[in-house]
Image (spheres, rainbow, N blue to C red):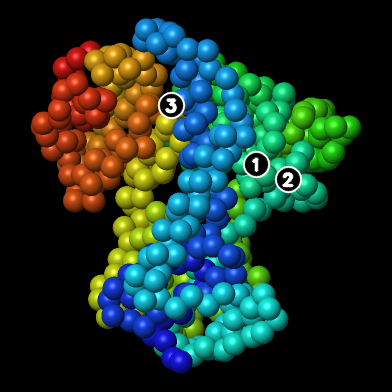
Amino acid sequence: MAYDVVVIGTGPGGYVCAIKAAQLGLRTAVVEKLPTHGGTCVNVGCIPSKALLYATEMFSEAQHSFASLGVEVAPKLNLRQMLAHKKQTVDQNTKGLDFLMKKNKIDVLRGVGRILAPGKVSVAGADGNTQEVETKNIVIATGSEVAGIPGVKVEFDEKVILTSTGALDLEKVPGTLIVVGGGVIGLELGSVWARLGAKVTVVEYLDAILGGMDGEVASQFQRLLGKQGFTFRLGARVTAVAKSGAGASVTFEPVKGGPAETLQADAVLVATGRKPYTEDLGLKEAGIALDERGRVKTDHHLRTNIPGIYAIGDVIAGPMLAHKAEDEGVAVAEIIAGQAGHVNYDVIPGVVYTSPEVASVGRTEEQLKAAGIAYAVGKFPFSANGRARAMLHTDGFVKVLADKKTDRVLGVHIMGFGAGEMIHEAAVLMEFGGSAEDLARTCHAHPTMSEAVKEAALAAFAKPIHI
C-alpha cells in the first residue's frame, strides 16, 4: 500500500504532523517503536513532570500558605498516590492519542523505522518481522535523547544516578539531591523533590542558571530558588559522576581554575540537555545531510537535501520544545499538501514550570544589546498587583522590551504565578507586530494577574499607574 505521507515518530511533532496531513486529505501512516504514542513529552517528559510539579506545589502550599488563608490542615505525603496520579495523567493522554489516530484514519505501523531510499521506509517489528512501505513523502520526527555530560562517562541506573526519566519515578524522597545542569529540566525536577524535603544542590557549568533567558530574570529567579532551599555551584565543570556507598558523588572543578571538589548525595540527576535521535534511521545511507551537532539539516521549508524527505522537532535546529515541533508538524503537512506552511521562530514562548513560573517570548536584553538595537524597558512587580496579594503570590515581575523608535514589542519576560499562561497575550501581540501602547491600551479585567502585563507595557512607553 502506498501512502502520501509516512511520519517516523509520534512525539508532539510527529503525531500533530500526521493528524494535520490526514485532515488535509493525505493518506497517512506513522511509524512508532514504543508501545504508546506521544514520545518523550507525553510518556517521560512534559506531561508526567507537570503532574508532579502541580502535585508538589499543592503539597507545599498546604504546608506553608494555607494557614494564612484560614485553612488549617496537616498535610502528609503519600508518594505512591502522587506517582499514581502522574501515571494516570500519562495514560489518559496516550489513550487520547490512540483515539485521534483512529478518528483521523491514520495507519499505525509498530516498529523501528528506517529510511531505505526516497519513498521507501522499512519497519522492523518487535516480533522480528520487517515490512516495507512506499510513500510519496517521509517526515523524520524522531525527537531527542539524553545527552549526558560531554567527555564524562556516566553509568545511569535510574535509581541513584538518574536521567530525567528516573527522576520521575523515585520510590522515596532523597535526603540530598545533586542536579547537574541548571537548565529547565534540572530546575523543574529539582523543584519537585525540594518541595518534598530533599536538599538540592545545582552544579552548573555557566555562571548563571537558565542560560539563554533574560539575565535579570535568571538572577532574580536564582535568588527565589535560594530562599526555597536550593544551593548553587555555578561556573563548575563536572569531571566525574559515580556511585559512592548507598548514594553517588559528583566531582567538579571551577571553570576559571582552582582545586577540584567532590560532593556526596543520596541521588544525582544529570540534566545537561538532550541530543537529536538520528541513529539507525538510515540517514547516511540515504544521503541525508546532518550538521556539526548531528541534527538533520533542513531549509526554510523543513526540507532535507533529499527531495520528498522532511524533518521536524528536536531532530533539527532550534529550541527543543514540544510546541515548536507541533508548529513544524502543521507546517510540513501544509507544505506537502501544496499550501504555504510557515513557522515564526521569533515568537516561540518558553516556560519553566517551577514556582514561581518563568516565561519568555522574543528577545532578551542581552540579545538586543548584542544586536545594537535601541530599546525601552517597562517593568511591573507582582507585589503591586491586587490579585497577586490576595492569592499570596507576589513574587516576581513582568518585563516588556520595546523598540525605542517604533514601540514594537520585541520581547516579554515574566516571572510569577501563572506566567506560563500570561505569556500568550504577549505572543499574540508580537505575532501581529503590536506595540507596547497597543497592549497597554487593551482593557484587562480587574483584578487579575494579567494586569501586571498591561502595567509593564504602559511603563515601556509612559508610566505605570499602580506604582
Amino acid of disc 2: Glu
| Secondary structure category for the residue under label 1 | loop
Question: Where residue 79 sits in the image (x, y, percent)?
Answer: 61, 31
Q: Residues within 10 Å of mark 3 (few under 14, many from 20)?
A: many
| Amino acid at pointer 3 | Pro
Task: Tell me if 217 is positioned left or right of 276 in this view.
Answer: left
Q: Which mark is residue 169?
A: 1
Give the distance between the C-alpha atoms of the residues marked 3 and 1, in whole angstroms.
23 Å
Residue for badge 2: 158
Structural distance between the alpha carbons of marks 1 and 2: 9 Å
- What's the residue at 40%, 79% (across, down)? 28
Closer mark to the observer between disc 3 and disc 2:
2
Any part of residue 241 in sight: yes
Upstream in the sequence, badge 3 or badge 1? 1
Binning the other alpha carbons within 10 Å of mark 2 as few (below 14), some (14 to 19) or many (20 upward) gives some
Residue 234 in sight in this render: no
Label 3, on which residue? 356
**Residue 343 sits in which quadrant?**
bottom left
Residue drawn at (60%, 70%) of the image: 33
